[in-house]
């Protein structure tokens, strides 16, 4: 089972940007996809974005046009560039490695957007 370590979270004002990083202990191209999820206080964890082995990306409607997922397979890393941040983007962001029905999450990184 791979281990995932996220970084890059922090406090930012609304309208600002952050870039999250996720480093995997394994080859990210060996999984079906790599993804980002987020969980706001008192709410369920929800999908944000993913990037498949073939490079295709998908986004939640709430972040489409503002967030961009990318990867560097040589570094076994996945990134989430977050622009035009809103207060409702405040959450713990989790990196995920998905293979079939198996999902492995990292420990998460806190993103707080202030008004």
Image (cartoon, helix red, strand yellow):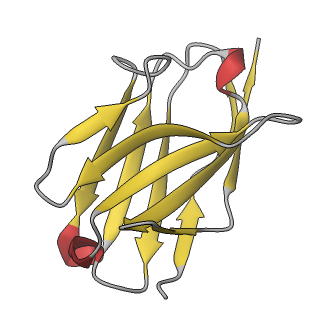
Residue at position x 67%, y 59% in the image: 108
Residue at position x 36%, y 59% in the image: 34
Q: How many marks?
A: 0
The quarter of the displayed image where residue 39 is located: top right
Horizontal side, residue 109 vs residue 71: left or right = right
Please identify the residue farthest to the front as the structure is shown.
101
Horizontal side, residue 48 vs residue 81: left or right = right
Residue at position x 30%, y 35% in the image: 58
Where in the figure is residue 7, as x and y percent of width and height? 57, 60
Name the foreground residue: 28 vs 20.
Answer: 28
Horizontal side, residue 90 vs residue 75: left or right = right
Please identify the residue farthest to the right as the structure is shown.
42
Where in the figure is residue 55, as x and y percent of width and height? 14, 51
Where in the figure is residue 89, as x and y percent of width and height? 64, 25
Where in the figure is residue 115, as x and y percent of width and height? 77, 11
Q: Say if 10 sits above or below 89 in the image.
A: below
Residue at position x 46%, y 22% in the image: 63
């Amino acid at each position: 089972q791979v281990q995932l370590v996220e970084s890059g979270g922090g406090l930012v004002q609304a309208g600002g940007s952050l870039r999250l990083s996720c480093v995997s202990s394994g080859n990210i191209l060996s999984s079906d996809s790599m993804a980002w999820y987020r969980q706001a206080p008192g709410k369920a964890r929800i999908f944000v974005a993913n990037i498949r082995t073939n490079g295709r990306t998908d986004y939640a409607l709430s972040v489409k046009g503002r967030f961009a997922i990318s990867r560097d397979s040589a570094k076994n890393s996945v990134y989430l560039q977050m622009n035009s941040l809103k207060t409702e983007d405040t959450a713990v962001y989790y990196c995920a490695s998905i293979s079939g029905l198996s999902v492995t999450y990292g420990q998460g990184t806190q993103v707080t957007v202030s008004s």
